[in-house]
Image (cartoon, rainbow, N blue to C red):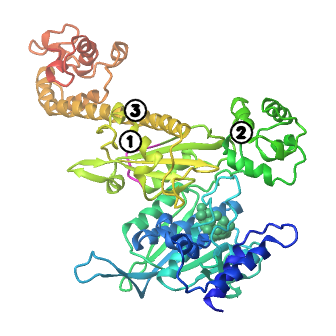
Amino acid sequence: MTETTAAVEREEAEAPKVVAKGKSVKERHRRKIRRRRVAKPENAEPATVAEAEARKMRTVNPAQYYRQNLGQLGFGDPEHALVQTIKELMDNSLDACELMGVLPEITVKLTATAKQYEVVTNKTKEGSVRTFPIFRVSVEDNGCGVVRGKVAKCFGKVLYGSKFFSFKQSRGQQGLGVHAAIIYAQLTSLEPVTIVTKTETDLMGYKVVLKIDTEKNAPVVVSAEEAPFERLHGTRIELMVAGAYTDKVEAFLREVSLANPHADLKFKVKASTTKDQRTLHLKRATEVLPPTPREIKPHLLSMEPGALLEMKSNDACCKSAKQFLTKHFVRISDGKALQLLKTAKLPPNASPKEIDVEALLKAARGGDIMRPPLDVLSPIGEGALEASLRRIFPDAEFIGATAREPWSYRGVPFQVEVGCAYGGQAVINDCDSVREGVFKSRVIRLGNKCPLIYDSKDCLLYKVVKEINWRNYKLSQDEGNLPYAPIVMVVSLISTKVPYIVPGKFAVAYHEEIREQLRLALQTLGRMIYAFISHRQRQEHEMHRQSIFQIYAKEVAKDLSILAGRDEQVLLERLLESVKHKKPKKAAELIAKPPIILAVPTTPSPTVPTISEPPAMQAAPAIQIEAEVAPQKKAEKKPQHTLDSYLGR
Ligand SMILES: Nc1ncnc2c1ncn2[C@@H]1O[C@H](COP(=O)(O)OP(=O)(O)OP(=O)(O)O)[C@@H](O)[C@H]1O
Ligand SMILES: [Mg+2]
C-alpha cells in the first residue's frame, strides 16, 4: 500500500458518518479526496500553511498519547517507574481480592537480569549514556482472576477496564494503570507481558503473552494457552522493566501493608545479578476483612452540565424526565423528581431530551436533595490502622488513630481517617533528621488505601497537615510547615471517586469539604498527641522528683536511724517507698497505719524523740511528713523536689 493510499484510507475512516439524502456524506467526502489526489499529488508543495498542517492532522489514540506522556502516569524515569510498576500491579491485585471477598495474599518478585537499558543523559562524567538494569517484576494474587475472553483486552487496550464507569470505592479508577506499565516495559525491554489467570470455576490457569500495539491501541497476542496456576483463583502478571532499585521500593511496600492491614505481602528481591535474593514478609495485622464497598448511582449534584446534557441526549431507556431522574440518580424519589421538575418548569411527562439541564441543576442545588448514602465505603478502621502502625513501628512510644464520619463533596461520598506513630527507633529511621536530635515528621498519604508516592506538595492531604497549628498540641513547628517531632502521620482518604489532580494519581485536588473533615480529624489526633506528651512529661517530672529525693534519702535515713534508733536500711526502704506515691497519703490512711517509721522505744531515751511528744525534729517520719507538708507546698508554691520541702523546713 502506498503512503498516499494509506492517507486516503485514513481520511476516509475519519470522515463523518452522517447519512444525507442521495449519496452518503462519506461517499461524497471520499470522492472529494480522490479528486484532490488526482489534481495534486502527495509530494506537491502545500499551497498554504493551513494545508501543510491539514496534511499532518490525524486522530491520536490513548495508547499513543500515553506512550509519549508516560511521565504523567509515573513512568517518567527508571527510578520512579520501578515503584510505579509494582504499585499498579499491586493495586489491581488488592482490588481483585476485595471483589472476591478474600484476605489478600500477594507475592511480589523483583529480579535484576543481565539485560541493560541505556539512556542518554548529561549527568554522568564518563559519557552521556547511563545504564539501568532490566528487572523481571512479577506480582501474583489470589483475587477473582479474569475470564479468558477478556484477558487480551483487559491488558492490551489502553483505557479498557471494569472500574471507570462504576461508582464504587476501588483503588483503580481509570483503566490506565497496568497498561502504562506494559507500555513502559515494551518500550524499555522490548519484552511482552505474561499474564496467567484463573477464575474460581477454571480447572487450569490461562496464560497469555501479549504486547500493546500502541498505533492501534489493540492487543497483539503472542501466545495463549492453558498453564498450571497453583492457587484456586487469582492472577500473576510478569513484566520486564528498566529500573533503579532504591529504598523507596521497600518503603512503598511497607506503606501498602500499613494501608491494608488485612493483606499478607511477600516480597522477594534480587536487587542486582551479584546479590542474593532477600525476602521481606509483611504479615497481616488483622484477620478481619474490611467491609465490602457498595456501588451506588451518581448524585445529581456531582454532575457537570455538559455531562448531564450528553447523558439525557443519549438516553434510550427512559420514557419520561421523571423516570430519567429516578432511574439514573441516587436519592431521587418520585416525589423529589416531581418537585425538581416543577421548579425547573418542566412537565413530569416530558421526554428526557426536553430537559433543560441548567434549570434542572439549579433546581437541584436549591432542592435540598439528601446526601448520597454514606455507608457504601470501606474504611481501614481505627483499630486496624492502629494495629497496622504497631506492626510497622513496633517500638513506637505512642500510636493513635481516629476517623471522621463519612461525608460528601459535590455529591460524592468520602471519609477521612488519620493515625500516627510517635517516637521509637523505627519512626526515627523514617523521619528526616534536621539536626542532632531534631527530626522532621513524615506524612504517609493514602487514596483509597493506596500510598500516594509523588507530588506531595500539591496534595490537599499534605497541605492540611501543614495548615494545622501543631504547637497547640505540644509539638514544635515553623508556621505552615510539618512539625519537628519524631512522628509518622498517616492521612487516608477513601471515596467512590478520589479527586486526583493527574491520571497518575499522585495528589488529591482541593475540595472544601474534604479539607474541613481532614482538619477536624487531625485536630482530634493532635489532642491525642497532646494527652500523650502531657502524660509523659508528668512521668518525667515525677522521675526527676524521685531521683532528687534518692540523692538525699541515704543521708536522711542515716540521720533518722541515729535519732530514732531504728535500722538504717529499713528506714531507707520506707523513705524510697513513700516517695514513689506522688499524691500525699491522706491523714486517715496514715493514722490507720501502724507507727512504722519512728517506732517509740519502750524506754524513752532523753536523746530520742517519741511520736506522742514530738520535738521539732519529729518532722522526720516520712509518711507523716508527706501528709502534712504536701498541701502546704501547694499553697506556698514551693518547689516539690527539695529536701527542705520534704522535711517541712
Ligand atoms: N490482578 C488482576 N485481577 C483481576 N483483574 C485485573 C487484574 N489486573 C487488572 N485487571 C483488570 O484489568 C483492568 C485494567 O486494569 P488497569 O490497572 O489498567 O485499570 P484500572 O485498575 O481499572 O484503573 P487505574 O488506571 O486507575 O489503575 C481492571 O479494571 C481490571 O478489570
Ligand atoms: Mg489499576
Callout 1 crowding tier (Cα within 10 Å): few <14, some 14–19, many ≥20:
some
Magenta span: predominant SS is: loop
Residue 159, image quadrant:
bottom right
At numbered mark 2, what does the secondary structure look like: helix, strand or loop? helix
Q: Is residue 90 above or below residue 404?
A: below
Q: Residue at x 23, y 21 (%)?
A: 622
Q: Where is residue 381 in the image (x, y as percent from the top left)?
A: 58, 46
| 3 vs 1, front mark | 1
Q: Mark 3 points at which residue?
A: 531
Q: Residue furthest bottom?
A: 1
Q: Please name the amino acid that badge 3 sits on.
A: Ala
Q: Which quarter shows the C terminus?
A: top left
**Relative to 370, is 519 on the left or the right?**
left
CA gap, disc 2 and disc 1: 38 Å
Compared to residue 295, the image places residue 413 above or below, namely: above
Please name the residue shown 15% across and 23% down the image.
643
Residue picked out by circle 1: 466
Where residue 353 sits: x, y (%)? 83, 47
Q: Is residue 11 left or right of residue 649?
A: right
First reached walking from the N terminus: tag 3 or tag 1 = 1
**Where in the image, quadrant-wise, is ligand 1 located?**
bottom right
Choose between 430 and 132: the one closer to the eye: 132
What kind of residue is marked 1?
Lys
Asked if the magenta segment contains residue 125, the reply would be: no
